[in-house]
Structure formats: C-alpha cells, structure tokens
Amino acid sequence: MLTPVLNAAGFVFFGSIIAPERNKKSLAILFVLCMAVIGIFVFLDLTGAGWNGYKFQFRNGVTTCLMGILGACVGMSLVKGRIKRQQSR
C-alpha cells in the first residue's frame, strides 16, 4: 500500500537532486509529470480503456492513485525544505 507513496516521492525528490542548479524548475516539472501520469491512469480506469489488449484496472481501487498523489506532495515538500535549508546557509 505504501509503494505508490514511495515511488512518487522518490521520483520527485531524487529527480530534483539530479539538477541541483535548477531545483525549483525540476521540482515543478517532475511534480506536474507525476500528476499527469496519475491523471492518465485514472482516465483509463474510469473509461474502461485497455492497454495492449488488457483492461486497465487498479488493484486497490482509487486508493493507489491517492497514495501516489500524497507521495508526490511529500516529495515536493521534501525538496522545498531542502531548497530553504540551502538558501539559509
């Protein structure tokens, strides 16, 4: 159940570490990208669309998407805290 939280938080947090001179831009881009992917998955599930011939379904309903959104927000807050600590030095 915590896998979507950790995946999304890690994606946003570690992705912004890759470009340390552009922390804010990379944070915004990765957060929006994560939300777009989650939105696409919700759309596919709600419309009953398939992917390569398989019907797309969530294992635990919409809970996994909510956990992914929470994880992306956690990653965003971790990066913002790190940016503030770097600026205060």
Image (cartoon, helix red, strand yellow):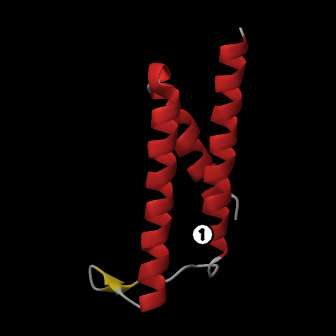
The image position of residue 33, as x and y in percent, is 43, 53
The residue that appears at 63% across and 33% down in the rendered structure is: 79
The quarter of the rendered structure image containing the C terminus is top right
Q: What residue does disc 1 label?
A: 65
The image position of residue 60, as x and y in percent, is 64, 79
On the picture, is 1 further left or further right than 30?
right
Q: Quadrant of residue 52?
A: bottom left
The quarter of the rendered structure image containing the N terminus is bottom right
73 or 64: which is nearer to us? 73
On the picture, is 49 further left or further right than 84?
left
On the picture, is 53 further left or further right than 89?
left
Circle 1: element type: helix
Q: Is residue 15 visible?
A: no
The residue that appears at 66% across and 16% down in the rendered structure is: 86
Q: Quadrant of residue 69?
A: bottom right
The image position of residue 24, as x and y in percent, is 52, 32
66 or 84: which is nearer to us? 84
Give the answer, above or below, for where 47 lies relative to 28. Answer: below
The residue that appears at 70% across and 58% down in the rendered structure is: 2
Q: Amino acid at mark 1?
A: Cys
